[in-house]
Image: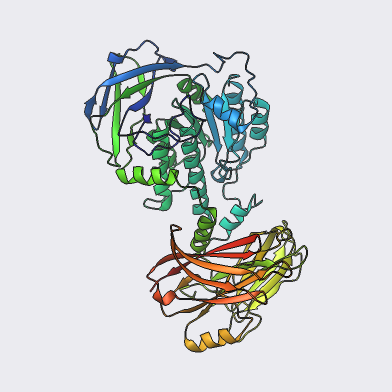
């Protein structure tokens, strides 16, 4: 289905004068376009229907069919026959995807939710191999898994490349090793990692549906191979399901679901999430079968012949609600398949999307806010990580910690940090940070070369009992070519005046691991700047709100001796999220750090 809506649907249509993937905007609820498959005697397309043969209702209100177009493609080039079919670049792939004679598929292999058992993996590979071998020379296909970013997504016509990836595919349901990326290591540092993986899968599926929706107006097909991610009613993953529905319906993307488990192995209701995805997007639910290829042929047929039926809805407002669509055909003995409806955009969404589209992304701001969000975790301890220039070719990585709130029943007293390699072998001496009053040291310091470093964290009680243990990857920045280096700011926190005076008098005070402060907290921000010889750096600290809007300049400092401190007046700030934009300058060189914090009473 296709919906053209005022000011919101970015990337929904590509016109002849636009670059593919570039957003355009419409004024007012315009035209709803529904892609309808009509077949007879199995999957044979009915190709001779006329406008008067269709009946459409929206929310049970009859609508007038205004446009009708029959689309038939078979995977062969119908124009520009001398143009090479090989995809030469991402831009070339986008241009090809916008063509009407191109069938566009994405194969999503949800390895997080597919078992590696041979009776599941081998039939899946076989069905996919047969499907790929049926593709025509003009078809365009992307292959994706939960960790594939849209930047890395590649549309191709190379069957050998696709088949090679299919041959090497293996499910990882319930498996934690091998770890494929730092993202997975972050997942495993949380106790609810299975639920997090379901969220990763659904977020990637939503991103894929959104991206495909912006490529062109015609049908796009996602083949979602999965045993089904876990979704609890009312959970964030349940909200993601709705967002996938919205993205697919607005972008005319059909999601076909394929459960690779053999016949009779799926319990009652065990595939309901998959069936929901297919039903909400007009796709096929291929479940509980020993031969998925039999129905995958229908997926190919659905993408090869369909009608685009358009109408202007009698509803004229942008209400942000779901509108049910029913399509009937005045001919007996045919099968009609269309989406069950669409989510209309609200006026608020339209305005916000237009503003967002006109505003470049601020990666420094989003990174700071993300770090603030990540400080809420299910571990026994909260950890602060800082970076500074150590030597000619090293980066100093610093750690402090404190108990998470509320303090767990097993009160943590120490934190052991052990660098390890990819196999878990220890690479250097561990450091232990004390947490009891007066216990030293209060900070761990490692000098690493730039790149990726794995670290094993172990939180311990005062008696040495292990409370929690996890491994995570750390990206180590490279300061070797930066003449001006602004280290990670340290937030020094005191709960009363006695602590504050002690921090003021201690040039080596350890930073707090939290960025959530009460109105009675006394805060110092400590800055460390390394500038070229003979140049005195200046530092300016601006206070921003969570949107990145400037509020005020807190202070401008001249840094002598490489360090400076500034009080942060949290007591005068209202309950909210704020961001410090810290900019150091030395001659023509500049460096920035962004730190988010929250004031809560």
Coloring scheme used: rainbow
Query: Can residue 199 be seen in the rendering of this structure?
Result: yes
User: Where is 535 relative to 283, above or below?
Assistant: below
Q: Position of residue 525 (x, y in %)?
A: 55, 74
Task: Give me the residue at 45% from left, 65% from top.
Answer: 578
Report the residue at 60% width, 50% height from top: 175
Residue 174 in picture, x, y percent from top left: 57, 50
The answer to which of 263 and 506 lies nearer the viewer is: 506
Quarter in which the N terminus is drawn: top left
Q: Position of residue 114 (x, y in %)?
A: 56, 42
Q: For residue 389, what is the image quadrant?
A: bottom right
Callout count = 0
Query: Is residue 286 shown to the viewer in this render?
Result: no
Question: Would residue 18 be found to the left or right of residue 151 on screen?
Answer: left
In this view of the protein, which residue sits in the foreground, 77 or 27? 27
Q: In the shown orientation, is residue 592 left or right of residue 64?
A: right
| Residue farthest to the left, as pictured | 61
Q: Measured from the top left, where is residue 532 in percent x and y?
A: 72, 66
Q: In this view, does 408 lie above or below 5?
A: below
* Residue with the most extreme bottom position: 498
Q: In which quarter of the image is residue 11?
A: top left
In the orientation shown, which residue stands out farthest toward the top?
48
Q: Nearer the viewer, residue 459 or 345?
A: 345
Which quarter of the rendered picture does the C terminus lie within? Answer: bottom left
């Amino acid at each position: 289905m296709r919906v053209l809506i005022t000011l919101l649907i970015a990337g929904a249509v590509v016109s002849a004068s636009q670059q593919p993937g570039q957003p355009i905007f419409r004024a007012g609820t315009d035209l709803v376009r529904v892609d309808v498959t009509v077949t007879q005697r199995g999957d044979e397309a009915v190709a001779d229907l006329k406008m008067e043969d269709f009946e459409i209702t929206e929310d049970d209100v009859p609508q007038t069919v205004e446009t009708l177009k029959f689309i038939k493609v078979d995977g062969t080039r119908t124009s520009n026959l001398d143009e090479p079919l090989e995809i030469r670049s991402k831009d070339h792939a986008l241009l090809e995807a916008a063509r009407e004679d191109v069938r566009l598929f994405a194969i999503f292999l949800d390895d997080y939710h597919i078992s590696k058992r041979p009776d599941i993996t081998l039939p899946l590979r076989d069905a996919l191999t047969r499907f790929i071998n049926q593709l025509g020379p003009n078809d365009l296909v992307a292959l994706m898994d939960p960790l594939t970013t849209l930047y890395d997504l590649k549309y191709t016509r190379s069957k050998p490349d696709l088949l090679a990836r299919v041959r090497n595919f293996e499910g990882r349901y319930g498996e934690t090793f091998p770890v494929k990326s730092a993202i997975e290591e972050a997942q495993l540092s949380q106790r609810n990692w299975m639920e997090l993986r379901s969220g990763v899968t659904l977020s990637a599926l939503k991103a894929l549906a959104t991206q495909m929706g912006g490529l062109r107006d015609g049908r796009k097909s996602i083949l979602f191979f999965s045993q089904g991610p876990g979704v609890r009613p009312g959970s964030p993953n349940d909200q993601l399901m709705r967002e996938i529905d919205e993205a697919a319906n607005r972008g005319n993307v059909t999601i076909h679901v394929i459960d690779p488990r053999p016949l009779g192995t799926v319990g009652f209701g065990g595939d309901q999430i998959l069936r929901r995805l297919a039903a909400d997007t007009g796709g096929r639910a291929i479940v509980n079968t020993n031969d998925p290829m039999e129905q995958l042929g229908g997926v190919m047929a659905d993408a090869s012949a369909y009608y685009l039926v358009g109408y202007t809805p009698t509803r004229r407002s942008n209400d942000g609600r779901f509108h049910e669509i029913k399509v009937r055909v005045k001919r007996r003995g045919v099968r009609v398949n269309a989406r069950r409806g669409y989510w209309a955009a609200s006026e608020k969404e339209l305005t916000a999307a237009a503003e967002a589209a006109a505003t470049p992304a601020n990666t420094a701001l989003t990174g700071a806010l993300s770090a603030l969000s990540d400080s809420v975790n299910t571990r026994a301890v909260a950890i602060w990580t800082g970076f500074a220039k150590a030597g000619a070719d090293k980066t100093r990585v610093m750690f402090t910690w404190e108990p998470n709130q509320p303090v767990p029943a097993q009160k943590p007293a120490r934190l052991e940090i052990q660098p390890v390699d990819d196999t878990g072998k220890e690479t250097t001496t561990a450091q232990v940070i004390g947490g009891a009053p007066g216990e030293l040291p209060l900070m761990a310091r490692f000098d690493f070369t730039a790149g990726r470093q794995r670290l094993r964290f172990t939180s311990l009680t005062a008696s040495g009992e292990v409370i929690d243990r996890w491994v995570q990857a750390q990206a180590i920045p490279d300061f070797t070519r930066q003449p001006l280096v602004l280290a990670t700011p340290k937030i020094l926190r005191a709960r009363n005046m006695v602590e504050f005076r002690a921090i003021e008098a201690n040039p080596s005070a350890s930073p707090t691991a939290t960025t959530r402060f009460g109105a009675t907290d006394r805060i110092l921000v400590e800055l460390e700047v390394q500038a070229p010889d003979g140049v005195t750096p200046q530092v300016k600290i601006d206070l921003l709100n969570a949107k990145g809007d400037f509020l005020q300049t807190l202070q401008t400092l001249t840094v002598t001796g490489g360090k400076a401190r500034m009080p942060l007046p949290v007591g005068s700030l209202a309950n909210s999220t704020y961001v410090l934009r810290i900019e150091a300058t030395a001659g023509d060189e500049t460096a920035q750090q962004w730190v988010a914090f929250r004031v809560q009473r």
